[in-house]
Every structure is written in structure tokens, then in C-alpha cells.
Amino acid sequence: MYKRVLICLAIVAIVSGVTLAQQTPPPKTHLKVGDPAPDFTLRATDGKTYKLSDFKGKKNVVLAIYVLAFTGG
Amino acid sequence: MSVDSVPANREFAKQIGITFPLLSDFKRTVVKDYGVFNEEQGFGNRATFVIDKEGIIRHIDEGNVAIDPTTAVEACNALTHKKAATP
């Protein structure tokens, strides 16, 4: 009897896990590797303004987008 | 970069001891251009784009995968080595 309950619980756990995973699919950008990166001009915490195209021919750039400040990332 | 204001990012950087500048996309234009805007929540989803010197995207990490910078670092190393091979 206990064994049957445990199996049922396990199935429920697996199904919920799958459902949760389906509810939060990874976001998909329309951009692909090989595409030109859209240019941008943004203000930064050091008071300066940074333009992506200013780095053209000079430096590789990593654009790391984090969800919100004061969170884990 | 995030959609937080410059003052919010400045305080965030101070709290966690970040010394490099953080960019603010307060108007949400860049997160939209890069296809990572979360309309329901109003912020940019987590993502990392590695862009080479010619302005071409060479690597993309999206979602929770982007928490771990290993693959982005590898992409950067590949670009650096490419530069070394063809000066």
C-alpha cells in the first residue's frame, strides 16, 4: 500500500517538474550567431555614455544582460 | 547591462563591489533590439552576447545557461586566438 502511494507521489513529482519546465521555456532571441549586433548607445554607472560601434575595429565586446539590480543576477 | 536606472545600478554595484561600469537600458530599446525583452515582467531576460571587433555576434547564451560564463569565456578566448593567428 505504502509502495503504491510512494509511486503515485513520484509520478506527481515528475509530472509537476515537467509542467514547471514547460511553463518557463528559455527565451529565444531572433538574433543568431553571425548576425550583426544591433548598435546601441547607453549611459553607464561611471557617468559616461558607451556606444557599441565605437568599439568596432578595436575591441571584442561582451554584452551581459542581467535581469534586475539587487537580485542574484 | 540591465533595464535599471543609472542610480539604481550605481547603488547595486556599490553593494556588491563591482568596479567596472554597468550600462542602463532604462528605455528598454536595447533589450527589444536584442530580442530578450520580457513584456510580462518589463525587464530584459538574462542573456550574454559575445560580439567580435567587426560587430558580428559570435556567441549567445540565453536564460539560466547565461549564469555560467564558461561558454562565453571560451568564445572570447577563441576570438583572441583568432586575432593572434591573423594579426
Image (cartoon, rainbow, N blue to C red):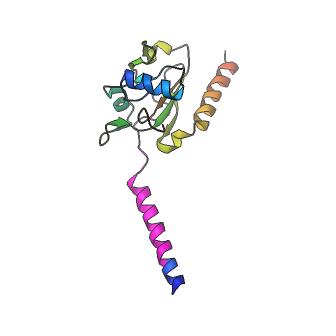
**Image location of residue B17, percent across then percent down:** 54, 25
Residue A27 figure quarter: top left
Q: Residue visible at 46% across and 23% down?
A: B22
* Stretch of the chain drawn in magenta: A8-33
Q: Residue visible at 41% across and 29% down?
A: B2
**Image location of residue A71, percent across then percent down:** 45, 37
Question: Magenta includes B58?
Answer: no
**Image location of residue A69, percent across then percent down:** 42, 32
Would residue A26 be visible to someone looking at this image?
yes
Which residue is at the front of the view, B20 or B60?
A: B20
Name the residue furthest front.
B15
Residue B34 figure quarter: top left
Question: Magenta includes A16?
Answer: yes
Residue B9 figure quarter: top left
Q: Is residue B83 left or right of residue B53?
A: right
**Image location of residue B19, percent across then percent down:** 54, 20
Name the residue furthest bottom.
A1
Magenta region, mostly helix, strand or loop? Answer: helix
* Total numbered badges shown on the rendered structure: 0
Which residue is at the front of the view, A13 or B19?
A: B19
B33 versus A9 height, above or below? above
